Image (cartoon, grey):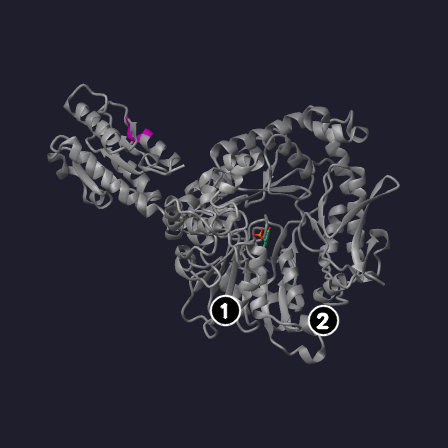
Amino acid sequence: MKITKRSWPVLLVSGQFDMPNDEGMRLRELESELTEVQKCSVITSYSYEDAAEIFISRADLGTILIDWDLPEEGTGEEMSPEILLETIRKRNLNIPVCLLTERLGVKKIPTHVLENINECLWKTADTSEFLAGRIEALLTRYIQSVYPDFFAQIVNYSAAYKYAWHTPGHMGGEGFLKSPAGVAMHKFYGENMFRADLSISVPELGSLLDHSGVAGDAEKNSARVFGSDMTYYVLNGTSHANQIIWRSQLLRDDIAFVDRNCHKSLNYAMVITEAYPVYMVPRRNKRGIIGPCRLSEFSRESISQKIEENRLIPEEKKQNSVKMSALTNSTYDGLCYNVVNIKKQLKKSVENLHFDEAWYAYARFHPIYTDHFAMTDDDVNEEHPPIFSSQSTHKLLTALSQASMLHIKNGSHAAINPDEFNESYMMHSSTSPQYSMIASLDVATKMMEDSGKGLLDDAILEAVTMRQKVAMITRELRGKGEWFFAMWQPEKIEHEGKIKRFEEVPSSYLCENQAPWILGADDNWHGFEDIEDNYVMLDPIKLTFTTPGLYEDGTMEEEGIPASVVTNYLINHGIVCEKTDYYSFLLLNSIGTTKAKQGSFLSGLLKFKELYGKNVSLKFVQPDLVRKFPEVYDGTGLKDHCRQMHKYIKNNKLLDKMQAAFQIIPDQAMKPAEAYHAVVRKNVEYVDLDDMLDRIPAVMVVPYPPGIPVMMGGEIMDSKAEPIYEYLKALQDFENLFPGYESDIHGVERVEREGKNCFRTLCIRK
Ligand SMILES: Cc1ncc(COP(=O)(O)O)c(C=O)c1O
């Protein structure tokens, strides 16, 4: 489909449009001149309020014409054109806005309004032909400015209808049209997708591998916008961005200091670099939510002690410097570290800092996150090593899946040499990049530069509204002696010198200030012990809901509702949550979330409560589950089901076992790399969990929840690691009792033995 001027409508705002007077007639003439002669499209709006709604819900407007002449008293118009203009400029500084006024009316327009508009057009003095021509010129210039350079180049190239004699083999989509399955694909995705799928041999688009031409310019532009010295587009996700970073700085036997709460791609980074990992251990609260690592862990003494105690690192290497530290920021549950504090602690103990910000690419664009992201602006007097950040732009911004960015800030005394770094980049890059992915990174950058603050304002406001709404419902229902879900957030906030309930604080305060989100030691709603001052904040847009069943001190209530029952119910009703723990679940209120989605979610929770209260049969609540396992669930009501599962978790101390398992870092029998070498040499075998004592897994074992490895490849399941064994056994038993609730455990395979599901893991052969 060709994008034309008509795709960018002009919004004409005037209460006079339908009036049977001269002004009305001229406005109608202007509309017809714009549509028929200038080939634009026009949307008319009769009030400023309605126009504001239209503007907020449509980012495709091309120009806005506002009739400035104020309505007469009593017309019911509540919004002034000034407020409409303010609303527009808060979200879009670039869209042309023209005021339509009388020749004499100009005098009445305040200066700050004149500063924020593009043109003042005289409704009755100039001809509609002239006015339409000026508006069309503004619209055309604006549309051109909307396209960031790389994307514009792709669009222009596709529009040139060149004959392709290069890869990809479908040659602009033609190849698909030669067989019905191909035609189906072509029809589904549309022609543009294929015409824009180009080969690296198209010189106009530059080269991502050597960062030249428009592709390189797009990366440089992203560096400017995201606050780095260098930015690289990585087209195989943050999984590879992490490996590129590590491979560029570490070699065999180098020491790395790694968050145990790391993504598995960092385990693979350890494998490919053959480094020795030394771990930082995150705190956990009694609910099992993963918290921040202790600031004291980053001290030189603490790191040296860990290295000293490591049995694998040879004595002669123990004095070597730590080449890399890698920290997950933010955590999955939305805890964001104060990077300035961490930089201070780590500047002397490690050579490079890596923040895995896969879920956090938006942080730079809203002041609420100040100082809590890797590319935070430098204090010029502060010394620090080079800082790397890997961000899945596709996860929470608007890039295509797998499109990530890798940002680098040079150290105060150590710069990263781009040519040297590029060797590692190229090792992990295809020579046939997908250009639409590059365009999506270019567009994500432009979106954040143009509208990032506004987009985040909306996402934060919606999240805060949801948080306050849930807090209100919870309070109201609890007041009547009933239960409801709650939110993991502060109950009380200090506002204007008074302590107020969270839901009673003005939402504008919560949306604009960091202070209410900082975790403190005094107000222990979060349940993490010894939280350091000004060290970690909760991200307002990551919404953790808690379900009944646990007291704050971690002891279990008589009755409870395991979160997986709730999220399974929600899935059946088309609502998919991000993550489910035992008694909590997480939703992401990202920039794509709509108000309608929130309403459906809340009504889903209230419906669940009603069904639970009536103990409605699972046959109606979770029909798929009952159909699949009738022998287990037929005839069970929702309340009974929750009760049975809660009892099992309580009686078998599943949470305590999880807690104990994650306190331990098992002894390392070999490096993760050596464990992998055993896989390549086929020196491995599957071992049933029952027989795992004293065995060494060759792969990492990561149960979800909570998503932290209990064992890394090469660690030994000896008596020290017994709590891990006990926890995995309890999980195995749980799954056999509650089929349909299998958790995802990376590194564990299920096999059926005598009608039961047994866990097994690839271990080093004995
Ligand atoms: C902390 C963390 N890092 C890295 C990744 C990998 O990101 P990607 O999916 O972009 O490869 C993930 C994915 O879930 C993650 O959670």
Q: How many marks?
A: 2
Horizontal placement of 136 versus 237: left or right? left
Residue 524: give x, y in percent of width and height.
59, 50
How packed mark 2 is, by other alpha carbons closer than 10 Å (few <14, some 14-19, many 20 or more), is some
The amino acid marked with disc number 2 is: Asn
Q: Is mark 2 within 8 Å of ligand 1?
A: no
Name the residue located 84 percent from the left edge and 41 percent from the top edge: 756
- Left/right placement of residue 538 relative to residue 44 reads right
Which numbered circle lies on residue 483? none
Instruction: Using the rendered image of the protein, determine whether residue 262 is visible from the camera's viewpoint.
Output: no
Decide which of 641, 525 is in the foreground and name it: 641
Q: Nearer the viewer, mark 1 or mark 2?
A: 1
Q: Which mark is residue 386?
A: 1
Residue at position x 23%, y 21% from top? Answer: 18
Quadrant location, the N terminus: top left
**Residue 206 lies in what quarter of the image?**
bottom left
| Left/right of residue 286 with respect to residue 207 in the rendered view | right
Please provide percent x and percent y for residue 376: 45, 60
In what element is the residue under mark 2?
A: loop
Q: Secondary structure at mark 1?
A: loop
Name which quarter of the figure residue 322 lies in.
Answer: bottom right
Instruction: Give the magenta part as a residue range.
Output: 46-50
The earlier-in-sequence mark between 1 and 2 is 2
Asked whether residue 427 appears in the rendered view, the answer is: yes
Toward the bottom, the furthest residue is 316
Residue carrying label 2: 310
Q: Is 664 located above or below residue 347 in the figure?
A: above
Q: Position of residue 173 (x, y in %)?
A: 49, 42
The quarter of the picture where the C terminus appears is bottom right
- Residue 520 lies within the magenta run: no
Amino acid under label 1? Pro
